[in-house]
Amino acid sequence: MAVDEGLKIELGKQGVFVTTIEELYNWGRRNSIWPMQFGLACCAIEMIATTMARYDLARFGAEVFRPSPRQADLMIVSGTVTKKMAPQVVRLYNQMAEPKYVIAMGACAISGGPFKQGYNVLKGIDRYIPVDVHIPGCPPRPEALIQAFMTLQKKIDGQPLTGEGRPRFLDAAQQGEFPVPVFGEHDLEPASNKGVWPLPMVKQGIGNSKS
Amino acid sequence: MKTVEEIKSAIEAVLPGAGVEIVSNLSPSGQHSLRLKPECALAVAKFLRDDAELKLDYLSNATGVDWPESLEAVYHLYSVEKKHGPVILRMKTANRTDQVELPSLTPIWRSAEFQEREIFDLYGIVFTGHPDLRRLLMWEGFKDHPMRRDYREPDDFEYEPTAHDEVLKRSTEHQAAVAGQPGSEAGA
Amino acid sequence: MKVAEELLNPKLEGWNRPALADPGDEGELLEVAMGPHHPSTHGVFRMDVALDGERVVRLRPVFGYLHRNHEKIAEGISYLASMPYTDRLDYICPITNNWAYALAVEKLTGQEVPERAEYLRVILGELTRFQNHASSIGFLTQEMGALGTPLMYAFREREKILDLFEELTGARMMVNYMRFGGCRVDASAAWLDRTRKVVAGLAGFVDEFERLLATNEILMARTQGVGVLRADLAINAGVTGPMLRASGVNYDIRKVDGYGIYNRFNFRVPLGDHGDVYDRFMIRLLEMRESIVILQQALKEIPGGPVMSSTAKIRGFRPKPGEAYGRIEAPKGELGFYLISNGGPNPYRYRVRPPSLINLTILEDMCLGHDVADVVLIFGSVDIVLGEVDR
């Protein structure tokens, strides 16, 4: 049950602060998202630049970058995920405690990026783990990373605690850990996690398709 | 620095029968190379490193090349003491399938250690005498040699928005193969 | 021909590490995998370290976590299309990667570069070297426990330089600026003035850095005598760049090859005495000063003229069959490109000679006998970038 905004402001002028548990809960969580120190490639340098004095990310709540996944809320996958690295990424994601979020930063983390044709390149980290925010760019500017952070904060703000749209960590039926791929002889096995990466309903070959 | 012909005669003066050939380079860079016979490669390499005039003590680059008939290893040598270079050495394997051994130059120049491991990983040339020949870049159980021209990439392009030519052909085959399996989505 | 006996099974030169398999000791050693996710491994790199207490007994590096198949992709696209990929090799110094590739293709096709373009290349190259060395020192001190303050100072200067890059080329990091036969875009007089202002401020920054760090007790105690690299081992192992010069070997490709117009500038090459981590740190500091010297000269002497010759072969060209190896003194070491052409529009073989990978050849030798905390510093002093190691 939400409180009428006008009433809130009137009461606020009298020194009485009214809110719902949901707002308070989400407010606390979104203003203290601690990312994990997880830079893979070039986007990591822009991520570091975002935490430096000019584009300070700490003022948005990302006060410290924790090296340990157990202590982090957010994994910013910044850089190309290769097939050799993919099992470690999924393992790290599994080790993070709920609630956890993933930002796929840069073209490589979204879909393989400029290296999409590579035999060792995983074509997007969302084949194995669910991603909350995607940032396009190669590398995205620090301002783009800040905007992604704010988008994630808006997403957390709007999450109801009970009922249909509640997030994964409050829903006992949903899983928070995903199967880790193993190294096969020619490729990773499995090539993607069903349920996370459904084959899209798009007819392949737009334009000159002869199929 | 000596020209390629002078280096060849210097080698053959000390190691007769070494069978060194000159491979000329038609591009404007003018960097000609010497082809070594695999049996004599270690002796020639030691001479090139220790000779008082050449003193090629620095191996800058070791790489593999995939030709239609054989595989090749190419080495670029420079001298830190005399500040000259490059001297380029080449060795070809007998064929691409079963006779792919070449002698390792790691005992002479330590910098070949990782580079020869990479050539083994990506091309499949087996370097005899290398102290630790394992894959460098791909994982341990990987079976192919990816930089070869006949390497077939795995079918991991389930979603290709603008497929055409080669990719369209492979993508169609892949979709047909996957469509017959249970659990796949119907609309793609 | 008859091969001498000792060559059939030669003794390994430059090898001073123990046998790779130590039977009998395995039960008492602690095996630690440092990486690929580790706060101090500069990216995704793994070191399998075997420890006897705190002392390193064996160290085996594992590569390939960022192997992005640059060389294979380059065989399928034209020469010009590989230029943006070279930005992503050593991603802290995109300009010098572009330069090395442009040099190799210019050797392959026999092209000349106009003078103004050479001066612009030197200016941007030395700015890149400056910010690379500043960042490297910043990361090294962060691993020592300085919690990021020198790194913040270094990145403050780096942002000024990146602003210059962005104004000239359109991008902060992946500039894609060099072309075969010149540079993509000319610099305006206003940009040159702004660069002169930035360069004028850099000397003060280096002074501040040196005053705060060079005689710092903690830094000296942790880095002097740690990770010593002998000169003969360094040469034999193919080490190049500031690491080689810290061991006392006078080999700077800017002086040796004199590529571009480097023989017009008056600059010194600092050399170290001991080859330890402190020397590498000081060499980088001193090279920053030499970069400022070169920048001042270049900014004074830059002539007018075109930045690309009218007959430059940039796109759609087919070089004659042949090969070329072009190398430069990148901030990390010798960066070389080896190209083989078979007359087609794409290279037949495209090889990157990565300084970071080859500088890691003797990582184990430098770390043996030291504590595991020193491994972090020694590794940081090698100054690698994973994009270059794994390509």
Image (cartoon, rainbow, N blue to C red):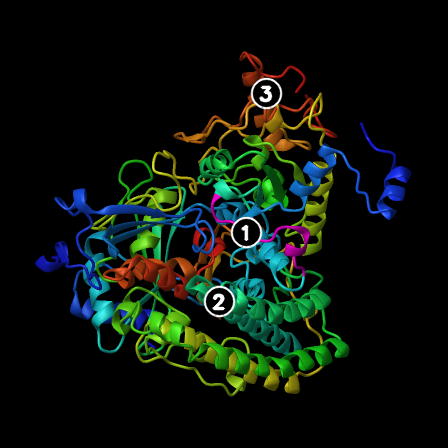
| Front one among B180 and C327 | B180
Vertical placement of A181 versus C313: above or below?
above
**Residue appearing at x 65%, y 36% in the figure:** A132
Q: Position of residue A179 (x, y in %)?
A: 48, 27
Would residue B23 appear left or right of B29 to someone viewing this image?
Answer: left
State which mark lies toward you, 2 or 1: 1
State which mark lies toward you, 3 or 2: 2
**Residue appearing at x 17%, y 52% in the figure:** C19
Callout 1: helix, strand or loop? loop
Q: CA distance from mark 3 to mark 2?
A: 48 Å
Q: Position of residue B14 (x, y in %)?
A: 16, 69
| Front one among A33 and A46 | A33
Per the image, the residue denoted by label 1 is A65
Dot 2: chain letter:
C
Per the image, the residue denoted by label 3 is B175
Q: Position of residue B163 (x, y in %)?
A: 65, 31
Dot 1: chain letter:
A
Inspect the magenta stretch and tell me whether residue C123 lies in it: no
On the question of residue C287 being in view, the answer is no
Give the quadrant of residue C125. bottom right
